[in-house]
Structure formats: C-alpha cells, structure tokens
Image (tube, rainbow, N blue to C red):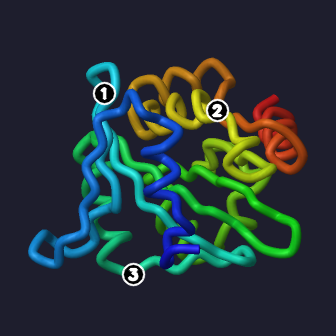
Amino acid sequence: MPGQDGGLRRLFRKHLKNVDWTTVESRLTGSGIPDLNGCHGGVEFWIECKLTKGWAVRMRPAQVGWISRRVRAGGRVVVAVRRKGRGVDQLWLVAGEAVATLRLRGLQGLQGVPGAGLLGCWHGGPAGWQWGAILAAAQGANGPARAAGKAAGGGIRGNSGQGAKVALQARKGRQ
C-alpha cells in the first residue's frame, strides 16, 4: 500500500472523477498543507490523507496548525483516515475543526461524542464505501451546510457497523 496515506489520494481521484483535484506534494509550499485540494459544484475543500492500523492518527504540528487556521478562516477541510488491518478496511472522515482532538485522542476519542467532528465512517474497503456521501461530507465540512446539518440534528453519516452505531450514539446524545 502506498506511503502513509493508504492510497487515499489515488482512491479519491478514481472514485470521484467529477471533482477537479490538485495534489499538493511540494516541499516548496507552506508546511502542513493537506494532500488534496478538490473543487466540485463551486465548493472548494481540502483533504489530509492518513493511514492507521489501530486508533491513533499521526499528525505533525504543522498539519494541525495549517488545518486549524484554514477552518478559522472559513475553509472546508477534512482528515480522511484509512484504518486498515486484520480484516478491517474503513474510511473515517473527520472535520478539520476536530484536528487537535484527533491528534491527541485518535479515532476512538471522536466516537459517540456529539459535535466531536466525526463526519462518517465507511466499512468494507473502497468498493463498499459510499463515495457520493463521502463527497457530500467533505464539501460540507466546517461550512454552512455542516452548520445547518448540526442545527437540524444531522451530522454523522456512514454505511454500516460501527459507523451506524456511532451515528445512533450521537443522535441519542443530542436528545
């Protein structure tokens, strides 16, 4: 599997062909810039791609800083984490506003906590992930659509298993 991103850059490009993608890989750009910039339907967003076998997600301080600044400026940023190992191949999407929590507590620290920034969890590997829902979550991260969804009781989306359990726990916590 390629590098520390779990092949996510390639997978996003393959499964979301209608998005205008730019891959950022230059050391000449600012430190901490996410791996992908996408634009679809007039909405621009950034994706930082990560791979983990367990629950911890390694993020450099420069990445946390860049994402936090962009979110404060009104930008849409998500961290896409591929959790892969021992029969598990999941995609977790985390809103940029939760990047510091993700770095400190890992994926488990976001589960079942309303408003914690978990946008969704998809299971079954890339063929089983709901790419349309993933795009919608990335486009709405930290933006007006996400704020409206939170106000209406929306938020976490996923396809099955733990993602559905997390969504149910989050909804119960809002009542």
Q: Residue at x 36, y 80 (%)?
A: 61
Query: Label 2 crowding class (10 Å Cα cut-off): few <14, some 14-19, many 20+?
Result: many
Amino acid tagged 2: Gly
Disc number lying in front (2 or 1): 1
- Label 1: which residue? 43
* Mark seen at residue 60: 3
Sequence-first disc among 2 and 1: 1
Q: Position of residue 56 (x, y in %)?
A: 65, 78
Disc number lying in front (3 or 2): 3
Sequence-first disc among 3 and 2: 3
Q: Quadrant of residue 144?
A: top left
Q: Position of residue 74 (x, y in %)?
A: 27, 40
Q: Front-most of 76 and 38?
A: 38
Q: Front-most of 102 and 52?
A: 52
Sequence-first disc among 1 and 3: 1
Q: Front-most of 168 and 39?
A: 39
Q: Residue furthest left?
A: 28
Q: Quadrant of residue 35?
A: bottom left
- Cα distance in 3D space between marks 2 and 1: 18 Å
* Mark seen at residue 122: none
Q: Secondary structure at mark 1?
A: strand
Amino acid tagged 3: Arg
Name the quadrant of the C terminus: top right
- Cα distance in 3D space between marks 3 and 2: 27 Å
Query: Label 1 crowding class (10 Å Cα cut-off): few <14, some 14-19, many 20+?
Result: few
Amino acid tagged 1: Val
- Label 2: which residue? 155
